[in-house]
Image: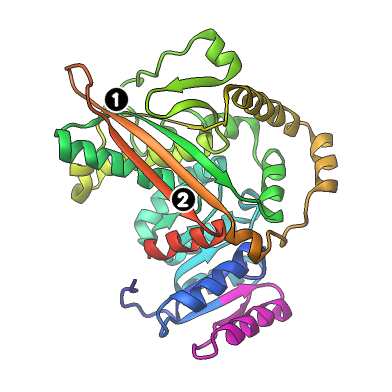
Amino acid sequence: MSFKEHNRLYDLVVFGATGYTGRVVAEYITANFPIDTKWAVAGRSVLKLQAIVDNCKSVHSDRSPPEIEIVNVDNNEEMSALAKKTFVMITTVGPYSQYGEQAVKACVEAGTHYLDATGEAPWVYKMIKKYESAAKESGAILIPQMGLESAPPDLCTWSLAKTLRKELDAQTKDVVLSLHVLRAAPSGGTISTVLSVFDNLTLTELLESGKPFAHSPVPHPAEPKRRETSIWQKILGIHNVPNLGTLTTGLTGTTDQGVIERSWGLLSQIPSRKDQFYGPNFHWEEYSKPRNWLEGILTHWLLTIAVLFLAIAPVRAIARRFAPEPGTGPSEEDMDKEEVEWRGIANPDTKSPVTKQAFVRAWYHGSMYKCKCEMTKNSL
């Protein structure tokens, strides 16, 4: 990993470093980034930021600690000044639908590259519509959803399409991904974000962002043909997909959809990447893998009911009383036991009957938050 030459004070800044995710990111940078990386941690509390710096010193005393920048997310002047000091800003301040736009705006105006690990796809859709043109003018590259939502599914899809091009000389017609294994506990901040979606986004924004190819910079040339499903499959939520088995409604499918479909559109536009375009008939779906059909039905209905209940403000208020506080999360010991696995298949876009498919498997054992850090590092 290397940064391009620039005239900024910092190579990168971690904004929101005192939160749970921010602390993990700061520790990861200290341990894994080049020793000459010029960076800073930013937030409101100098005492909490100093504690982060002291921790970095104690763990890796041979490395230069990060600088401290005191910034209030609600202060536009402070946010603008911070963005102008750094080449890249990594922000972990959430919920993003409540606090995220200020960082996006500051980075776009300063021409500063931006990364986050949000899972709030409707908010990302809103930011695309509002800032994409300005970002192109300033040269700022904005990379949201760099965590488990949605970098791994995006990379899996890209890998499947690459395999079909290489092995079958074909474009991609349809992709089915399965979140096969997920053993991880969310942080308090993640739960807070889920509970705040309906507070910070309108129903219209939620519905608009969920439409097929809404996040893509170009429209789909035709309504993609979706897999045929029976009325019982729609009611029970379970599907049998050859080579993947029994699948059910997934936790992250609607979140990942926008990123994958945006990649599809961007690959068709970027001259140096047009040979990687998935194809005009591309269609994508994601599910999760239950242990059996009964668990699949229960998962589908529990997720459906949960979404309906979260739309009711009093229910969200009650849920917040029992939810862990933002800033808390799993212990180091628990994180080391975490695991995630995706599997996926892709069919080629050919006129002849499909006899071969591409298959992908992505697996990670260890902290999901450190997995986010790995993906962030590899994007720089």
Q: Position of residue 255 (x, y in %)?
A: 52, 39
For the point 59% across and 47% down, the residue is: 183
Res 326 quadrant in image: bottom right
- Kindly report the distance in space between the C-alpha atoms of the residues bearing marks 1 and 2: 25 Å
Q: Residue at x 23, y 40 (%)?
A: 163
View extreme (top): residue: 231
**Label 2 packing within 10 angstroms: few (<14), some (14-19), many (20+):** some
Q: Is residue 340 above or below residue 256?
A: below
Rendering coords of residue 137 (x, y %): 35, 57
- Which of the marked residues, 1 or 2, is nearer the chain's N terminus? 2
Residue for badge 1:
221
Q: Residue at x 34, y 77 (%)?
A: 6
Q: Nearer the viewer, mark 1 or mark 2?
A: 1
Inspect this view and state whether residue 73 appears: no
Does the segment drawn in magenta span residue 46? yes
The answer to which quarter of the image holds residue 299 is: top right
Q: Give x and y (percent) for residue 221.
A: 29, 25
From which residue to which does the magenta span run?
41-70
Q: Amino acid at mark 2?
A: Tyr
In terms of depth relative to the viewer, which is nearer, 315 or 135?
A: 315
In terms of secondary structure, where does tag 1 sit?
A: loop
Above or below, 78 against 284 in this view is below
Left or right: where 312 falls relative to 124:
right
The numbered mark at residue 131 is: 2
Q: Position of residue 258 (x, y in %)?
A: 45, 38
